[in-house]
Image: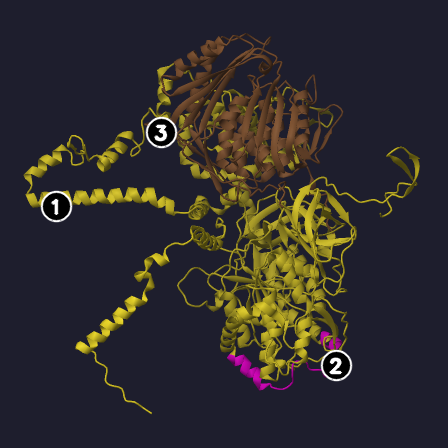
Amino acid sequence: MQVTKHQQKHSGPKAEKKLKKQGGMAEDKDERKRNPKAFTVQSATRMARTFHRAQDLKAKKHHIPFVDRTPLEPPPVVVVVVGPPKVGKSTLIRCLIKNFTRRSSEDICGPVTIVSGKKRRLTFIECSNDINTMIDLAKVADLVLMLIDASFGFEMETFEFLNICQVHGFPRIMGVLTHLDSFKNSKALRKTKKRLKHRFWTEVYQVAFYLSGMYLGISDSGSEDLGRFISVMKFFSLALIMEDLTDPEKVRIDAKCDRTVSLYGYLRGTYLKNKSQVHIPGVGDFQVADVSFLPDPCPLPDAQKKRALNEKERLLYAPMAGVGGVVYDKDAVYIDLPTAHVCQEQEEVHPTTELVQSLIDTHATLDVKMAASKVSLFTSSATLDLDMEIDKQKGEKEGPQENLVWDAKTQRERRRVVFAEEEEENDYSSGSDTDDGFDGGSDQEGQEEEDECDEEEEDNLSTLIKKARVKFGNTEKTVTVSASPVKKQKIEEVKDNRQLFELPVFADSEDDLEMSDKESGNSKKGEEEREGHESDFGEDDEEVDVKMDKGPGDQEDEDEEDNDDQAEDDWDDEEDVGITKTIEKNITSKHRTFENEEEEEEPCFVTEGSFQWKEGLQQKASEAFLRQQQATPNLRKLVYGTGTKDPFNLEAGNYEEEEVGGLFRVSRPHDNKKHWTDAKDCSRFSPDSSHNWDIGEMLKSIRDCFVTGKWEEGQDAATLLKEDEELYGDFEDLETGEVHEGQTGSDEEENEGERLVKVDDEEVQKNKRLEKKRRLKERFDSEYDDGEATYFDDLKEEMQKQADLNRAEFEDADDETRVQYEGFRPGMYVRLEIPSVPCEFVTNFDPHYPVILGGLGSSEGNTGYLQMRLKKHRWHDCILKTRDPLILSLGWRRFQTIPLYHIEDHNGRHRLLKYTPQHMHCGASIWGPITPQGTGFLAVQTVAGAKVNFRIAATGVVLDLDRSVTIVKKLKLIGYPYKIYKNTCFIKVGKFQLTSPA
Amino acid sequence: VYRNNNNMASQALTYDGCNFFRQRLVLSTLSGKRVKIKNIRSRDDNPGLRDFEASFIRLLDKVTNGTRIEINQTGTVLFYQPGLLCGGSVEHDCNPQRSIGYYLEALLMLAPFMKTALRATLRGVTNDPTDPSVDLLKSTAIPLMKKFGLEGEGLDIKVVKRGMAPGGGGEVVFTCPVRRTVRPVLFTDPGKIKRIRGVAYSVRVSPQMANRIVDSARSVLNQCLPDIYIHTDHMKGANSGKSPGFGLTLVAETLTGCFLSAEMSSTPQGQGDPVLPEDLGRDCAKLLLEEIYRGGCVDSSNQSLALLFMTLGQQDVSKALLGPLSPYTIEFLRHIRDFFQIMFKMETQKASEDEMKGGDKVLMTCVGVGYSNINKTIK
C-alpha cells in the first residue's frame, strides 16, 4: 500500500532538530574521534613495514635516468613490415605509400623513405620470410607492422620474429590482421579477431594491436587509419644494443675483384666516427675509409605553420625501387621524380658512372622482378582457398605445434601455429562464446580493458567491419578445392608490364645523360676553382712558415693579422690535413713527375716549406714550448694539423727515404725527427727557464691564484660577510639585555630617515623587514628543502644538465667542424666508402635484402672466448648437443660457431654437458667476436629453409669475455689393479684416449 | 659465417721509434687495436728495446690475458696484439732503470677497466729525478681519478718501502676498483689555492736533511700562502731501500679540489753533482710556483690521464681547463685520435690583464666514445 510522505521541512524548528540529530549521529559514528586511543599505533614494526612497503612501491616506479641523447633532427623511423608470405606485405606498403605521397609505386624493392608529416619521416622495409632478413631487420626496426592472415591464423614466422625482437631489444610492434574480407560471418570475424589479439597479448604485452580489414590491392580507409596511427605514435629512442647503424641504399662498383663500395644511408643511434669499424651482417667487419655527409635526399619540410603538407613536400625516396631515376655522385644524390618535385639541384654528373648506374639498376631489378612478381599476384577475388591439410602433430608438447598446410593458390606450404588449448577451443567453438581457454590468469585482469579496446577498434573500423559483414558467408576455415596454378603465366604478364613501365624511366635517365653532359663543363670549372683554392692554402702555409721563422720578436704583429684572418685560418685548418697528404704523395712521386715539374712547381715548393716548418716545430718543442704555443694562434693546428700522419698508411707517407737518381739513398741519421721519435719516454713537462721566481714581479703574476689574492666580484669575502650581516646581524644579548643591531640600514640612511615623515619611515621599515624575512625564508628553504630532494631527483637533474650541455656545446659550429669533434650525428644522410669488400657482395646484391652497417665498439673487432648463459627455446623440438655447429645472432653479427655447453657446479667449476638441459639455463662457451657483456643472442641451427618446427633453437645472454676458459669433463677410466698397498691401489688403465667421448 | 677479414679492420697501427712507448701500448690495450712499432733505436749504437721497456711489456702481460707480443731479433720491431685486461693480484719487479712512476702511470690508465679489482705490488725505484714519483701520483692522480667516478673502496697507492735510484729496493702497493663506465666531467673552474701540503723524504741519510728541505721550501712559499704543511718522512732499516737520497713533493690544493704539484729529488748516488737539501727545497718550491703559473685544473704530469678518461667517458661532452699542453700530452692527443678517432676542441684562454692568475690556459672539450669495460664479468 502506498503511503504518502509528508513534505520535508527545510526550515523551522523541526528541520533544525532533525539536522542536530543527524549531526549528533554523525559525531557518534566517528569512532576515531570518540575513542582515539583505540586507533593509536599498535605495532611499530607493522607501521615500519607499511611505510617500507609504500616506499618500495614508490621507488619501483622510478626508471634509471639516462642522458637524453636523441638528435634534434631524427632519422626516418624504420617501419618494418613483417609477415609470412602472401599475407599482403607489399600491398600494405604500397597502400601506405599511396596514402602518404599520393603516388603509386609498382614494385617495392629495398627501403622506401617518405615524408609523412612536418617532423616525421618513415622508411618502409619489407621483411621476407628468410630468417637472416628477419634477424637483421629486428635489430634496426623502430616500428614493426606484423601482418597476420586472419583467415588462416597465426603462422610460425610471426612467433619467430617476435622472439628475435625479444632478444635484440623490443621495437614497438603493431599487429595487423589482413584478409578479413574472407569472413562472411561477422560473429566469426569478431571472434577470430579477439582470439588472435589475446594470443598476441600473451606474447607481447606492450603492443598496440590494430585490426584492420585489408582489402587487397585497394588503398582503403584501413591503411589510411593505419597510416595516421603510425604518424601519431610516439617513438622513444630505441635503446639499440650496438652503437649506430645506417641503412645504405646504393652500391657502387669500383674495381673488379676486391671491391670498394660506397653505401648511402641515414645514420641512426649514436655518432659515427670517421675511420671507425663497422660490421655488415652477412659480409664481415670493415674499416670505413671515408665518411661524408650529403644533403638530405628526403628533407623535412621547413617548420612553417601549416596544418597539412602540400603536394610538393610529400616526398618519396626509394632509390632501389623503380621510382624515378636516381643518380649518385660523391657529393650529391640526384633523384628524378616523374611528377617533377625534384629534391636536389644538380651540379655535376659523370656520364660514365651514370650509365653504369643505370645498368646495375636494371640488372638488379630484373632479377628482383622475377622474385617479386609473386607478391603482386593479388587480385580482387578475395577468399583464400586451402587445398589440403597435412597434420604433423606429435604427442603432447608445451609449445605450439606446427601445422603444415598446403596452400594451393600460392603453391607453398604454410606453417600454421596450433596451440594445444586453441585446438580444444576450436572443437567447441560453436557453443562457447570466447577464448577463456587460452590465456588463463592474465585474461581476467585484462578483461575490461579488452572490451574497451574492442569498442574503440570497432568505432575506428566501423566502416571496414560493415564491409566485411556484407560479405557474410563462410566460417573461418574454408576448405574449398579450386587450385589454379596460373603462376607462371602471371609472372610473364607482370614482366611484360614491367618492361612497358620501364621504358619511360629509361627515357628519363637519358635526359639525365644529356643534362650531365652539359654540366660536365661546369664540373670542370669547379675543379679548376678548387685548384685555385688549394694554391691559396699553399700560400697560407707559407705565411705560417714565415711566422715560425721570425721568432718571438715579431709575434705581436702577426697576432693582429691573425685576428683579422681568423675566419680564413679556421678554414685553412680544415683543409690542412688533406693538403699535407697530397704533399706527401708529391714527394714520393717526385722523381717520376719530373717532367711535369712546371705544373707542380708551386705545390712542391710548399712541401719544402711545410717540411721545414715541421722540423722547426719539433726542435722548438723541445726548447721552449710555452712560447711556441703562444705564437700559434690555433692550438689545433699544432696538435692535429700537421706533424702526424695516418698510421695506417705509414708506408705511403714514408718520405724520409728520398731517392736521388734511383741509385743512392739519402740517409740522415741525425735527423731531428729521428731524434724525437727515439727520445726518452717521459711525461714530465720541463719548466720554462725564462721564469725567475726570485723576482717579485713573477710572484705577483700568480698572486690571485691563492685564497689570499684578489677575488672576483660577488665572491669577495667582504661582500659575502656583508650579506651575512644583513641576515644575521641583529641579536639581543639576553644576559645584559643589550640589543645589537646589524648595520643593515647604514648610518646615512638613518640620518635621512629622521628627516622623512614618520609614516614613510614605518613603511620603509616594514619593507625592510619583509625583505629580510623573505631572504631568511629563502635560506631556510635552500638548507632544508635539499633533504626533500631525493637522490633520484638529483640524478635526473644532473642528466638533464648534461643533456643541455651536449646540445649547447657544438650548436653554433658548422657541420664540417662539428663532424670532426662529435662524429657524424644520427639523422645525417651519409656516404660511407668501404674498401676491400668481397666481390660476392656486389655480384649477388639483391635490394630485397637489407644492407645494414652496424658500428662496432673499439675492441669489438677482436675475437676471444665468450661465456654465455643459454637456454634452449621451449618451442624448439630437440635439445642441443655440445660441438654441434650453431648459427648465432649476437650483436650485429650472424656467425656459425661450435658451442660447448657446461654447468656450474657447487665448487665453482664448469662441468661439460653433452646436451643442453631440457628446461634449464646452462652455460655455453664459444670462440667468437668480442661483444659487450649483457648482449642478448639467439641461435638457429640452420638458416636455409624451414625444416624444423620452430627455427629459433636457443636464446641467452653474454656473461663474460676472456682469452681462455676452463671447462672440466668427467672421464671414466677402466683398468685393472696391478699393485696394492695397505690402503692404496694402483690401477693400470689401458689407453688414455682423449678423443673418445667419456 | 663470421670471417675476420684480412683487410683494414685487422691491420695494425704502425709507429716509428721508441718514444711514447707506453702511450701506444696502453691505448692499444684499451682499444683492442694492434700496434706495430718499428725502428726502435735503429740508429743507436745499442739498438732495440731497453730493459725497462721489456719490463714494462712483462707487466702488461701480467695484467692481461691473451696478449701476443712479437719482437724481432734485434729488438727494433715490436708487434703487440692486446689481450683482455684481467687484473687481480699482480707482483712485478720493475726495472730500476726507470722509477715505479713510469710503470704506475700506465697502470693508472688501465686499472679501472680490469676484469677484477687490481692489486699490484711493484718493487723497484720509488723516487728518481726523471719520472713522476709515487708520492706525486698518490697526491694528484688519485684525487683526479676520483673525479671521474672511480672512487669507492680501495683506490689507493701505498708506499711500503722507499727505494731511491739507482739501487731501488722500494715497494708500492696500488689498488684500484673496477668500473663499467667513466663519468663525464666539467673541470672549468680551478678555484683558488687554499693550502699547500708536501712530503720531504730522506732515506739512508741524516734525518735532518728532510727538516732542512722543509725550511727552505717554506721560506719561498710563505710569501704566497700561510697554510703550508710539509711532512717529513724518514724511513729506516728494511724500509729504506738500497741507495741513499732525499727529495720533496709539494702539492697545492684548490677550493674546488684540484691539485697542482711539483717535486724534486736528489741526484742518484754516483751520477752527477750532489745537491744541497736547501737548494733542493727552494728549487722545488719554485717549480710549484711555475706549476701554479701554468695553472689549470689538472697538473702538467697528469694531463694525459685526465684526457684519457675524458675520451673514455660516456657519449657526453666533457670539459677540462688545462695549463699549456706538454709535448707528451700533445703526442697523446694524436694517439687518441689514431686509436679512438676522438678529436678535442681546444680553446685558448688568454691571461687577462687585471687578474694575476698566471699564463694562458687551454679549455679542452670532447665527446666521449662511450667506452664500457668489456672485461668486467656480469653474474
Please indicate whether residue A769 sits to the left or right of residue A641 in the image.
left
* Subunit under mark 2: A
The disc label shown at residue B352, or none:
3
Circle 1 residue:
A763
Q: For the residues carrying marks 2 and 3, which lies nearer the camera in this image?
A: 2
| Image: A417 above or below A816 | below
* Subunit under mark 1: A
| Image: A644 above or below A815 | above
Q: Please name the color used to draw chain B.
A: brown
Q: Please name the color used to draw chain A.
A: yellow
Check whether the beta carbons of the residues at disc 1 and disc 2 lie within 8 A of each other: no
Q: Where is residue B320 shown, x and y percent of the image?
A: 46, 35
Check whether the beta carbons of the residues at disc 3 and disc 1 lie within 8 A of each other: no
Residue placed most toward the observer, A402 or B73: A402
| Image: A669 above or below A842 | above
The disc label shown at residue A483, or none:
2
Q: Please tell me how crowded label 1 is: few (under 14), some (14-19), or many (20+) other residues with Cα within 10 Å.
A: few
Say which quarter of the image contains residue B333. top right
* Subunit under mark 3: B
The residue type indicated by label 3 comes to Ser
Which residues lie in the magenta part?
A: A462-491
Please indicate whether residue B94 sits to the left or right of residue B219 in the image.
right
Q: For the residues carrying marks 1 and 2, which lies nearer the camera in this image?
A: 1
Residue A597 appearing in the image:
no
Residue placed most toward the observer, A932 or A879: A879
Q: Earlier in the sequence, mark 1 or mark 2?
A: 2
Q: Where is residue A122 shown, x and y percent of the image?
A: 54, 62
